[in-house]
Amino acid sequence: MPLPKWALPVSLIGTLTGCTVILKDYMGGPRYRGEERIAGKTVIITGANTGIGKETARELARRGGRIIMACRDLEKCEIVRKEIILETANKNIECRKLDLASLGSVRAFCKNINATERHLDILINNAGIMMCPKMLTEDGLEMQLGVNHFGHFLLTSLLLDKLKASAPSRIIIVSSYAHRRGKINFDDLNSAKEYNKQEAYEQSKLANLLHQRELVKRLKDTGVTVNSLHPGVVATELGRHLPFTKSTVSSVLLFPIKLILMKTPVQGAQTTLRLALDSSLETVTGKYFSDCQEKEPAPQALDDEAARRLWAISEAWTRSNVDVDKHV
C-alpha cells in the first residue's frame, strides 16, 4: 500500500525537529548533575529577576536555600519571586533593591544586608550590561564598567566581613569569554576621551577577572573562595542593545541560529550552579570555569600588577574603604 502524500513531509519535519532538539542540547553544554541541598544557607544573586540569574535563583531555591534577589526593578522581581515560590514551595525568598549603576544604592543594600542577615554563604555577582550606547552611571562612571565592575566591586567589598564570618563561603563572578579580547585602558579607563561599546564591554569583563585575582590574595586563609565563569552565549535580555535585536528582519533571519547555537538561560546557569553547589569546590579558589569545567583565562587576566592597580583605582573611585553607615 503506497504511503499518503503527506507522510514524507511529516516524516521529514519530525526528523528535522528531532535533530534540532539534539543539536540544541549538545550546543547547550553539560548540565550540573550534583544533588547537594543548601538548606540553612543564604544566597545573594544580583540580577536575579531575569535570564541566568533567574534560573540560578530558581534552582538554588529548589535546593532549599534562602535566596535574596538583588534587583533594580522590584516590581519585576516580585513577579519572579512569587513564580519561584509557587514552583519550588520555598517561601524563604526575598526581593531587595539594588541598582548597580548607583553607588549609593549599593551602599544602602549592603547596610541592610549587614544589619538584617545573620550570615551570607554565597554571593553571586551575576547582573550585567552589554554593548550599550555611551551612558554614565549616577556617579559619572561609564555604564558598562560602572555596573559590571565598579558596582560589584563595592558590593563585594562591603559584604566581605559578613562572608568571612560565614566561612566557608563563596563568591562567584559571572564574567565572559569576551575578557580574552579585553584590555584595561588605564589612560582612559572611564572612556572619557573615546568610547567604543564593544571595547568597553570587553574591558569590563577583564576587570571582573582582575578583581577576582586580587581578591583571592586578600582573602587567603579566610575560608572565602572566589571563582569566575563564562556562562556561554545565552539568549537573554543582556543582548538587548545589539543592533540585530532592533531590526525585525535581522531578528527573523537570525532566529534559526539563535534557536540552535545560543544557550537557553537554564543551560547558561549550569556553570554558576556548579560553582555554588559542588562540595568538591569548597576550597577551590581563583579559578575560571566554562561549561562546568575549569579553563585557562587569557594571559592579561593573570597580570598581578594590573590587578593591583585596578584595585587601587576601584577603591578610590567607589570609596569602598569608607564606612557605610556614614554615607547612607
Image (cartoon, rainbow, N blue to C red):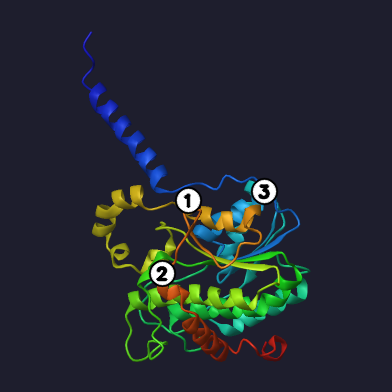
Please, what is the three-letter code of the amino acid marked with disc 1? Gln
Mark 1 vs mark 3, CA separation in Å: 18 Å
Residue 133 in sight from this viewpoint: yes
Is residue 253 toward the left or the right of residue 312 in the image?
left
> Residue at horizontal 66%, vertical 53%?
279
Quarter of the N terminus within the rendering: top left
Q: Mark 2: which secondary structure? A: loop
What mark, if any, has residue 298 been given in the picture?
2
Residue, disc 3? 36
Q: Earlier in the sequence, mark 1 or mark 3?
A: 3
Q: Which of marks 1 and 2 is nearer the N terminus?
A: 1
Kindly report which numbered mark, 1 or 2, lies closer to the viewer in this rendering: 2
Q: Mark 1: which secondary structure? A: helix
> Residue at horizontal 71%, vertical 91%?
326
Camera-side residue: 43 or 287? 287
Mark 3 vs mark 2, CA separation in Å: 31 Å
